[in-house]
Image (cartoon, rainbow, N blue to C red):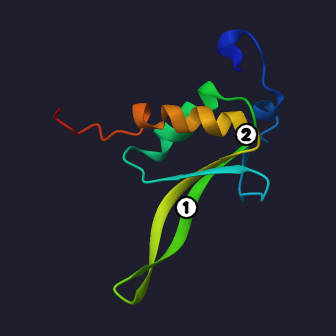
Amino acid sequence: MSLIHGIVNLLNVNGLRRVEHCPPHFVRVVFDIRTSEKTISDWIYENLDGRFYFGNWYEEVEADGQTKVVLSKCAAFEIPHEASFFSLQLSEFNQNSNQLW
């Protein structure tokens, strides 16, 4: 995974882990962000191994006869099981730190 576990990830070393565009073969997870982008990307770097995309996701939504554009976040993964793991863990680290409950 990372140097923490004694293994060097060559994608990290060469700066090839995070891609700037979302390739069509990556598995996407679209969500509303409730924490900082850094928290999300740090979690991905620390817990997953493969290449990933993290950025904005725009979607057109029909409401009351009007088309609106909705902005969400998208994390996409080259390794499909990493998308599943991210989806399952997302609610644990995608939380507003200002909540009182």
Quadrant of the frame with the C terminus: top left
Q: Closer to us: mark 1 or mark 2?
A: 2
Instruction: Report crowding for label 1: few under 14, some 14 to 19, many 20 or more residues within 10 A (C-alpha).
Output: few
**Disc 1 versus disc 2: distance between alpha carbons?**
20 Å
Quadrant of the frame with the N terminus: top right
Instruction: Report crowding for label 2: few under 14, some 14 to 19, many 20 or more residues within 10 A (C-alpha).
Output: some
- Residue at horizontal 79 percent and vertical 42 percent from the top: 16
Location of residue 59 in the rendering, given as x and y in whole percent from the top left corner:
53, 71
Residue 63 is left or right of residue 84, and the answer is left
Q: In this picture, is 90 found above or below 62? A: above
Which quadrant holds residue 68?
Answer: bottom left
Between 30 and 63, the one lying in front of the other is: 63
Between 22 and 28, the one lying in front of the other is: 28
Q: Which residue is tagged 2?
A: 80
- Residue at horizontal 77 percent and vertical 57 percent from the top: 23
Q: Which mark is residue 56?
A: 1
Location of residue 89 in the rendering, given as x and y in whole percent from the top left corner:
50, 31
Q: In this picture, is 20 found above or below 45? A: below
Location of residue 80 in the rendering, given as x and y in whole percent from the top left corner:
73, 39
Q: What element does badge 2 sit on?
A: helix
Q: Amino acid at mark 2?
A: Pro
Q: Amino acid at mark 1?
A: Asn
Location of residue 36 in the rendering, given as x and y in whole percent from the top left corner:
42, 44
